[in-house]
Amino acid sequence: ELNLINQKVASLTTLTNDERQKLVNDLGQLGPIEREAYLSSLTKQHEIVSAPIKTTIGTIIVDNKKAAKKGVKELAKRAKIAKGKNNYLKTIELYQSAAMLASNWELSNELVQIEEIIRKTKIEDLSVKKKDLEKEAKVAVKSKNYVEASAKYKYASKMASEIFKLGASDMTKEVKRLTKKANEYEKLK
């Protein structure tokens, strides 16, 4: 009986030798009906092949893994062009489309790289916005518009907080500094 179980388990090619041995031992503990049901279920599970899904992103049509890799490269290229024009919103959109494509076609290496690029791009975008808000706040201070200055510093502080959430640990001091400035100018209303 164990030989029969061994033969059936050997046909499951995705298991390691240790997993096969454990499965044989576990199946040996079951009754013949439960064992047959379990083996049948496992066999069916291994026979299921995920059919490729046709994906269309913009003008890119993907129906196989090779086309998916090409599509990811094309979207990344477009994203770099958008980033060169400082269009961070479009850059992030394009990279997210590339990430979705990589995820759908199980391109894990590409997906990890794209997710890191998205994170860095978001940090860069928020940093630019934070600097702009600080400049606007300084202009408001010079014109003695302390309410606006306080609001701009608060918003810049929120930007710094978002940057921190994305993994830039050096932003804690920046959040405190900007919040302190916001509170300082709020008192001068």
Image (cartoon, helix red, strand yellow):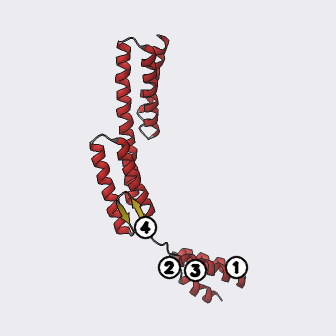
CB contact under 8 Å: marks 1 and 3: no
- Mark 3 neighbour density, 10 Å: few (under 14) some (14–19) many (20 or more): some
Marks 2 and 4, how far apart at CA? 28 Å
- Mark 4 neighbour density, 10 Å: few (under 14) some (14–19) many (20 or more): few
Tell me if residue 28 comes above or below residue 172 in the rendering.
below
Sequence-first tag of 3 and 4: 3
Tell me if residue 47 comes above or below residue 160 in the rendering.
below
- Would residue 166 be seen by someone viewing this image from the given angle? yes
Marks 1 and 3, how far apart at CA? 19 Å
Closer to viewer: mark 2 or mark 3: 3
Judging by the rendered image, the residue that carries numbered circle 1 is: 29
The structure residue drawn at horizontal position 62% and vertical position 81%, both measured from the top left corner, is 40
Marks 3 and 4, how far apart at CA? 27 Å
Tell me if residue 25 comes above or below residue 112 in the rendering.
below
| Amino acid at dot 2 | Thr
CB contact under 8 Å: marks 2 and 1: no
Sequence-first tag of 2 and 4: 2
Marks 1 and 4, how far apart at CA? 44 Å
The structure residue drawn at horizontal position 46% and vertical position 21%, both measured from the top left corner, is 151
Where is residue 86 shown, x and y percent of the image?
30, 40
Closer to viewer: mark 1 or mark 4: 4
Judging by the rendered image, the residue that carries numbered circle 3 is: 43
Sequence-first tag of 1 and 3: 1
Closer to viewer: mark 2 or mark 1: 2
Judging by the rendered image, the residue that carries numbered circle 2 is: 13
Judging by the rendered image, the residue that carries numbered circle 4 is: 54
The structure residue drawn at horizontal position 38% and vertical position 65%, both measured from the top left corner, is 62
